Image (cartoon, helix red, strand yellow):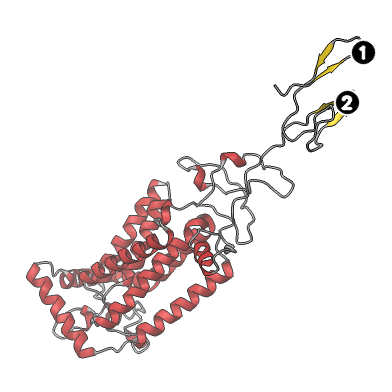
Amino acid sequence: MGESRVTSQDGRPEATPSPIAGQTDPVGGTGRNTGRREGGLAKPRSPRRTFLSRTPDPSRPSRQGGLTGFVRASRSPRRPRLWFEVLLIALSYWVYSLVRNAVPEQKAQALRNADWIWSVEKHLGVAIEQTVNHAVNSVTWLIVSMNYYYATLHFVVTLGVLVWLFRHHPGRYAAARLTLFATTAVALLGYYLFPLAPPRLMTGGHFIDTVLVHHTWGSMASGNFKNMSNQYAAMPSMHIGWSLWSGLIVFALVSAPWARILGLLYPTATLVVIVSTANHFWLDAVGGLLCLAFGFAVSYVWYGSLPHRLPRWVRAPGGTSLPGTPRREGETGADLPVPDAADGAGNVPQGAAEVPAAR
């Protein structure tokens, strides 16, 4: 069926191939002329290869839906821009400091809240801050080191983790940064709704202000800096919120056991420092933990995943694939850069089919 026969000069029938869909019948058939004749017969071309479609660039808003496309693009992991991140972090910290210090100090209310926190801890039998404060203060080199720890690592480690994420985990950077920002934002609400004096400022609490006693610059709320910062914004503790964020991010993403241990030790040491220097009750640390949980929840809702579960490598903002990196032990295909499935000439990069597209 569909086979055409041609009679040769000696009268014997000669079979010819059936016409392929879309080709011209070699003997006057109709259809598209896609073959070329050789010896009077049409030689069919080999089927045209079909390439994978180009993976959409998540950094470019979709043309369909307008605002919907923009929101969809902003929720997709993408390569961060250095200038934008530096500007965003600097602006955000300036706004955070401005708002935190603009919150009314409400000294009387803050002292009443501190007395209430202290009485609750005594009732529960967990009021250990004063004992720790006096014990550590008796070791001069240790308490001075803690004063400088309190003043510096809070910023140095947090910024260091952000830079590390930017360079080595660009696909996870935005989600981790959103977690940190949401944590800090909700802390501002706590400063406004629950002003709290730190233990060192309590009347009759017999706590030691270690910065004043040892003449160090370990606190922006002591000494010459006390008029530059709101001293009654102790709940929640962002020293705990930020250090725990840093520690969990490092623990989840590094493979070296010693680095993972340091990731867990850092927030633990920070808790000891804030209590020893009488800058916070340990219940302030619980408030910081709750704020961080809120931050992770916001990031999960926006990106649909926790930061460490997102792809490690993503496209650059212009759509260019990032250079390839060797696969390391424990990494999945989603951790590798995503190449374009086909270029403009229809060529598929080597290994493109082996690398799954990042979400």
Snapshot quadrant of residue 106: bottom left
Residue that appears at 88% across and 10% down = 11
Residue closest to the eye, 75 or 285: 75
Residue 8: x %, y % from top left = 89, 14
| Residue 38: assigned label | 2
Q: Please tell me how crowded label 1 is: few (under 14), some (14-19), or many (20+) other residues with Cα within 10 Å.
A: few
Question: Element type at marker 2?
Answer: strand
Residue that appears at 43% across and 66% down = 178
Snapshot quadrant of residue 243: bottom left
Name the outermost residue toward the right: 9
Residue 148 visible at all: no
Residue closest to the eye, 228 or 80: 80
Snapshot quadrant of residue 234: bottom left
Above/below status of 341 relative to 289: above
Residue that appears at 9% across and 68% down = 124
Question: Element type at marker 1?
Answer: loop
Which mark is in front, 2 or 1?
A: 1
Above/below status of 323 relative to 128: above
User: Earlier along the polypeptide chain: callout 2 or callout 1?
Assistant: 1
The residue that label 1 is drawn on is 9
Numbered circles on residues, count = 2
Q: How far is disc 2 from disc 1 in space, using C-alphas?
A: 19 Å
Dots 2, 1 in contact, CB < 8 A: no
Taking 196 as reference, is 156 left or right?
right
Residue closest to the eye, 178 or 61: 61
Residue that appears at 70% across and 21% down = 1
Residue 100: x %, y % from top left = 35, 82
